[in-house]
Amino acid sequence: MNGLDAHVLEIVERHRGRRNAIRAKTIASKLDITEREARDSVKRLIEVHHVPVASTVRAPFGFFIPESTEESRAYAATLVSRIRSTAERLHAFEANTADGIIKQLDLFGRKP
């Protein structure tokens, strides 16, 4: 784990439970880094170092270590919702690109 990730982990570990969530902006300010660097570090903590960091997009906003199964499940449900939304957006995008329109025309025996 690099030094930045270790410092971010130290901060996030002190924020247990959704009610104690910490914003990326606050992490960035404490470490004199950008919000993007803070978010990227949290992403690495989750994906590379397998730290169970959750986040919330409703007040209180930010990152936290879940304190209960309920908090973990609520965060997992948020991720599933995002995945579904992204899949729907991808489907709509592909349907409305040139290739998607050509496929639709082909279904009806029409040529572009």
Image: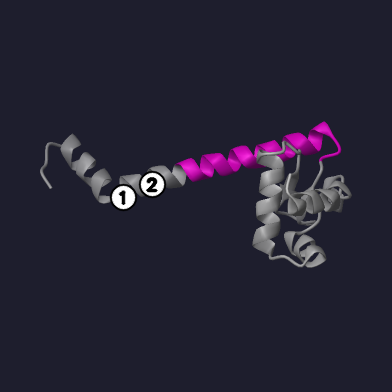
Q: Magenta residues: mostly which secondary structure?
A: helix
The foreground one among 16 and 38 is 38
Q: Residues within 10 Å of mark 2 (few under 14, many from 20)?
A: few
| Residue type at the position of mark 1 | Asn
The foreground one among 109 and 4 is 4
Give above or below for 39 relative to 107. below
Instruction: Look at the image and say whether residue 23 sits in the magenta stretch.
Output: no
Which span is picked out in magenta?
66-87
Say the numbered circle drawn on residue 92: 2
- Whole-angstrom CA distance, mark 1 to mark 2, is 6 Å
Residue at 72%, 38% (x, y): give it.
Answer: 49
Q: How many marks?
A: 2
> Element under label 1?
loop
| Residue type at the position of mark 2 | Ala
Residue at 69%, 63% (x, y): give it.
Answer: 35
Q: Position of residue 81 (x, y in %)?
A: 59, 41
Res. 16 image quadrant: top right
Residue 39 left/right relative to 88: right
Q: Position of residue 26 (x, y in %)?
A: 79, 63
